[in-house]
Amino acid sequence: MTAPHLPATSVSPAIDPGWDPAVCEPLIERLWALRRQMTALADRHADRLAAIDPAHQAGARNLLHYLALRSGDLRPLQLELSRLGLSSLGRAEPHVLASIDKVLGLLHRLSGRDWTPRDPDEPVGSRASTQALQRHAVALLGRTPPGRDVRIMVTLPGEAAADPGRIDAMVQAGMDIARINCAHDTPAQWQAMAEAVRLAARRAGREVRVLMDLGGPKLRTGPIESGPEVVRLRPRRDELGRVIAPARLALRPAGSARPVGAEADAVLGVDPDWLAPLKVGDLISLKDARRAQRQLEIVERHADGVIAALSRSAYLTADVVLRHEPHRDRRSALHDLPAAQGLLHLRRGDRLQLLPEGLGHEARPVGRGRRAQPASVSCTLPEALAAVRRGDRIWFDDGRIGGVVRKRLDGGGVLVEIGSAREGGEKLAADKGINLPDTALDLPALTAQDLQDLDTVVATADLVGLSFCQSADDVRRLRAELAARGASTLGLMLKIETQRGFAALPSILLATMEGPTAGVMIARGDLAVECGYERLAEVQEEMLWACEAAHLPVVWATQVLETLARTGRPSRAEITDAAMGERAECVMLNKGPHIMDAIRMLDDILRRMQEHQSKKRPLLRALRAWRGALDGQGAPG
């Protein structure tokens, strides 16, 4: 059998070198050079290391060693080390200098050279580094449940404040940390949710921590003109167009907010005197917004209204008049019609004005032969537009719509040409995210609202999330604000969600380690838009490696099992993505109607995967699935 061809380097002969000392010597010199680079970088940043909290000294020094190690291309060296059966340094993150020294020690012995087993410069070995990371994770996130090494964080919906039973169910399903998003709801609701979490944890006999995320300077679309007040009713049809279930319209007294008592496709108000005599079997006629004649039948009567069934589609507006058959003089107008959500319909090639203020609107015709006035939308941070330049890319709604800034406008706005949208166009709504990956946004991570919210956070939470963290100064500012409130020991969760934050990650990590407890959340949704979807896999890997080198816990976040939480059925790709979360210390789920199913599935996935993977290292447990397979007796598992 012929051995596979391996590319030769300056230190490798054409055949496998075996244990030839002449091959070991150049490798020893290369590793010593790497070692000197690592210790030199740590020495150069001695002032930074002096500011590090004692609990993080080893992690900070190891991070500097790791940055030095990864400053050059190690692939040729890795190949040579692997050919000798030695560690290729591919899993050295938590104990960089110790890994170098172990390989150096083996090469020295193979070459007959003296070697000192341990050096004072070496901050931590493999066992101590693992223990340090576990210690920091427990300090920040709490202990893991029996049989699972990765925690589950769940974003609480606002309704949970009034529904403690839902939180009980989440804790029973496997939630270890409850996340409260301070960009939504009120301080009273946050406190109610946190108290419900602690009560549920006590009932379950275990610890569940509370993370409160500060809103941060979120750049989002502003309000948009509402659409028409219209309700569309459609019966359910089979594939041949035959009606299999009529549309159901609930009618109740105008202005009432009381539920009618049965499920319906829409709920509208009518004149109370007109509604009172209606009974099951009565017919109602109308002409809808298209002047199409329609007839409804009353099929249910309840204390607070009736249910009418309709077997044909209808568009109902405030101009539609209901007539009680056969008493056609008994009429009622429709009330309480909901305004359609304001939307901008954008296609590739369209222009969009992004303005500092104002009510957004669709494109408007301005006269025959003249180009229509572009659609417009404002943004929630007008000061951000001052930094935008011609040619900068811009993305809306988690990257669903993209464009390029073509020019600046009078009044501080910009004109965007849409270049990325689905065939047929996309709809842009209010309160959707805006990303400017090419623009240097010099925005503080803490807003005036955040500082106000922080008073509630320090009295309520176990850890605080810093959104939009882009620099070491952002971390130090938050620590100063916590110290001013007597909460210096409150745990920090730094959300890295911009390209600028990713680029500054080493400095951010060192600043983070100036305090006692902290971790990093990889906000992959915004990172994908900022850094490009094609680069997301690379970016999230590099962040995991850097945090492991710093011995800091990581939260794997954004869109984990999102389809399952939203629809009740997972996609195949997101199962694999959830399994990747095994390499973090915590995985975050977002809210959704099927969140209980998502928690239970994630719990199962993490328990299974910890038998196969630990960080970057595969674990080779016995493969039960193929036991006896060659004898036709394959076993499940």
Image (spheres, grey):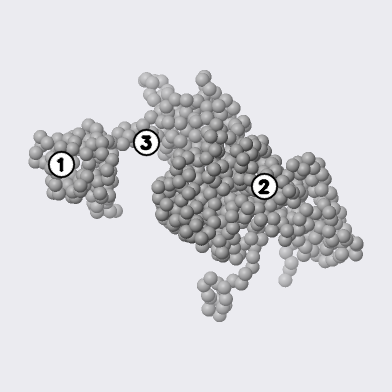
- Give how far apart the Cα atoms at labels 1 and 2 are: 67 Å
- Alpha carbon of mark 3 to alpha carbon of mark 1: how far? 32 Å
Secondary structure beneath dot 3 equals: loop
Residue under the point 15% across and 49% down: 280
Q: Which residue is mark 3?
A: 341
Q: Is residue 276 depicted above or below 550 in this figure?
A: above
First-in-chain label (1 vs 2): 1
Q: Amino acid at mark 3?
A: Gln
Q: Amino acid at mark 1?
A: Ala
Which quadrant is the N terminus positioned in?
A: bottom right
The residue at which mark 1 appears reads as: 276
Rendered location of residue 545, percent (x, y): 67, 51
Q: Would you say 238 lies left or right of 93 here? A: left
Front one among 265 and 286: 265
Q: Is 396 located above or below residue 308 in the figure?
A: above
Seen from the viewer's position, the closer of residues 634 and 120 is 120
Mark 2 or 3, nearer chain start:
3
Marks 3 and 1: which is nearer the front? 1
Q: Amino acid at mark 2?
A: Pro
Q: Can the viewer see residue 382 in this picture?
A: yes
